[in-house]
């Protein structure tokens, strides 16, 4: 059974930074992504990256502030979050899939990810 384990969440003041990590239990996934869910809201796309790291995609709300990257030798994907805002407060989930859809493939759609982490809480105070 494939497991994704997130870490790096916490409490930070507005304007601060956090770095989330997601370790993939020895698997190199074809594409990976980050999603978040705030209380009372639906899960939303944050960022995605293809297998080589050469293609990325970001939600407009985080573009220019967040950076997704991956280290395949360590089976890990990262989300560097800078200039955090209170509206970034949410549980952040790592997602991944092993199906090949093209070398540059990334996706914003949750149903295209087979594997999910348990989530890590990010709280940004004003």
Image (cartoon, rainbow, N blue to C red):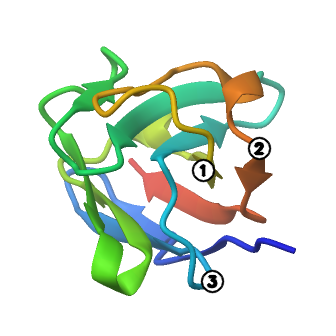
Q: Are marks 1 and 2 in contact (CB under 8 Å)?
A: yes
Taking 51 as reference, is 27 above or below it? below
Residue 57 percent across, percent down from the top left: 30, 26
Say which label, 3 or 2, has the lower sequence index: 3
Q: Is residue 3 visible?
A: yes
Residue beneath disc 1:
96
- Disc 3 to disc 1, C-alpha distance: 12 Å
- Disc 3 to disc 2, C-alpha distance: 15 Å
Q: Within 10 angstroms of label 1, few (less than 14), some, or many (20 or more) residues?
A: many
Say which label, 3 or 1, has the lower sequence index: 3
Q: Position of 85 compared to 82: left or right?
A: right
Q: Which mark is residue 25?
A: 3
Judge by depth and name the residue closer to the eye, 34 or 41: 34
Residue 14 percent across, percent down from the top left: 29, 51
Taking 39 as reference, is 78 above or below it? below
Say which label, 1 or 2, has the lower sequence index: 1
Taking 75 as reference, is 111 above or below it? above
Judge by depth and name the residue closer to the eye, 54 or 4: 54
Q: Position of 103 compared to 55: left or right?
A: right
Q: Are marks 3 and 1 in contact (CB under 8 Å)?
A: no
Query: In the figure, residue 105 lies in which quadrant?
Result: top left
The residue most toward the top is 60
Q: Which mark is residue 114?
A: 2
């Amino acid at each position: 059974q494939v497991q994704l384990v997130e870490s790096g969440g916490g409490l930070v003041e507005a304007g601060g930074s956090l770095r989330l990590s997601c370790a993939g239990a020895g698997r190199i996934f074809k594409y990976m992504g980050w999603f978040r869910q705030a209380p009372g809201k639906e899960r939303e796309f944050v960022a995605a990256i293809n297998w080589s790291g050469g293609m990325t995609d970001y939600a407009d709300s985080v573009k220019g502030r967040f950076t997704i990257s991956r280290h395949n030798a360590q089976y890990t994907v990262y989300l560097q979050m800078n200039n955090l805002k209170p509206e970034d407060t949410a549980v952040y989930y790592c997602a991944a899939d092993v199906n090949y859809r093209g070398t540059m493939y990334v996706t914003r759609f949750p149903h295209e990810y087979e594997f999910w982490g348990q989530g890590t809480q990010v709280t940004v105070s004003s």
